[in-house]
């Protein structure tokens, strides 16, 4: 059965304290893995797409990496404005939709 | 550049009434997806449409729910005879091409409350 598990469920960091969020997946035939950011009361905002193991993408303080079993979202020197829920989603080969995890709720304390 | 527009933002319905949720995709996008988000749960796929066609409705409940994306106008998600369990945030997303080739851009959702 397809599964996407994100950990931790919640994470509190001091401003400037770097850390990583994990997304473990089990899917028959990965077409792509997606990271989104969601602020309270808003829709998810697209961050990255990763297609193959070993691939890395960067945007400002965020870097996403992918292996055959999991993806990491590394946050370097986070700021309070990075506080949000980070969602991971996978797309199976041949599927029309994304399968989402339940997210990691990140709080960055000034 | 207007993003994906959803309305209303909040909708309150009594049990047994109908709910109509509207979604205008980003300019130039012809692929529309509807997702539902329950508290403490992940986004769940409901239906994928292109203009005038339902491509994949595998996530849509078989009864009371329907969706359309007409040639002119917004996409509509319709829930008939709502029940309390329908209370959730409903998100629409659009893309330039099928999701395998183009990322989804989400609206800010419609929060449905059934009393």
Image: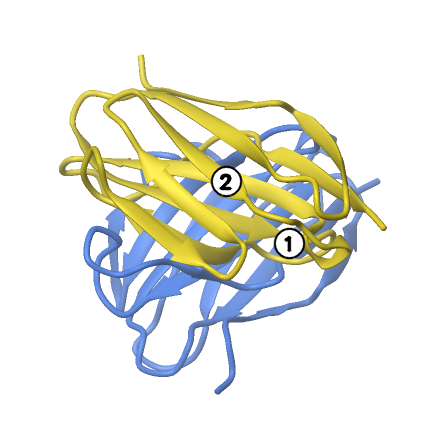
Indicate the quadrant where residue B15 lies.
top right
Q: Position of residue A3 (x, y in %)?
A: 38, 19
Q: What is the chain letter for disc 2?
A: A
| Residue A74 numbered mark, or none | 2
Residue A26 vs residue A40: left or right?
left
- Mark 1 highlights which residue? B19
User: Does the rendering let one see residue B87?
Assistant: no
- The quarter of the picture where the C terminus of chain B appears is top right
Depth check, front residue: B16 or A106: A106
Q: At 40% across and 43% down in the image, what residue appears?
A: A64
- Same-subunit check for callouts 2 and 1: no
Chain B appears in which tint?
A: blue
Secondary structure at badge 1 equals strand
- Distance from label 2 to label 1 (Cα)? 41 Å
Q: Say above or below: B68 vs B113.
A: below
Q: Say above or below: B49 vs A69.
A: below
Which label lies toward us, 2 or 1? 2
Which one of the lettered chains is coloured yellow?
A
């Amino acid at each position: 059965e397809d599964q996407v598990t994100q950990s931790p469920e919640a994470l509190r960091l001091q401003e400037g304290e770097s850390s990583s969020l994990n997304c473990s997946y089990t899917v028959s035939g990965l077409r792509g893995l997606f990271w989104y950011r969601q602020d309270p009361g808003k829709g998810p905002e697209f961050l990255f797409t990763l297609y193959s193991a070993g691939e890395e993408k960067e945007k400002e303080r965020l870097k996403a990496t992918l292996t055959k079993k999991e993806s990491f979202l590394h946050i370097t020197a986070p700021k309070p404005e990075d506080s949000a829920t980070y969602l991971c989603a996978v797309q199976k080969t041949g599927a029309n939709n994304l399968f989402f995890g339940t997210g990691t709720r990140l709080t960055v304390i000034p | 550049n207007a993003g994906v527009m959803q309305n209303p933002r909040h909708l309150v319905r009594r049990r047994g009434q109908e709910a109509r949720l509207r979604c205008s995709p980003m300019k130039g996008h012809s692929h529309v997806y509807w997702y539902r988000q329950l508290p403490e749960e992940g986004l769940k796929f409901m239906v994928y449409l292109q203009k005038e066609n339902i491509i994949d409705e595998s996530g849509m409940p078989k009864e009371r729910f329907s969706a359309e994306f007409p040639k002119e106008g917004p996409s509509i998600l319709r829930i008939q005879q709502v029940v309390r369990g329908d209370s959730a945030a409903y998100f629409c997303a659009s893309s330039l091409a099928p999701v395998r080739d183009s990322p989804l851009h989400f609206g800010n959702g419609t929060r449905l409350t059934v009393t």
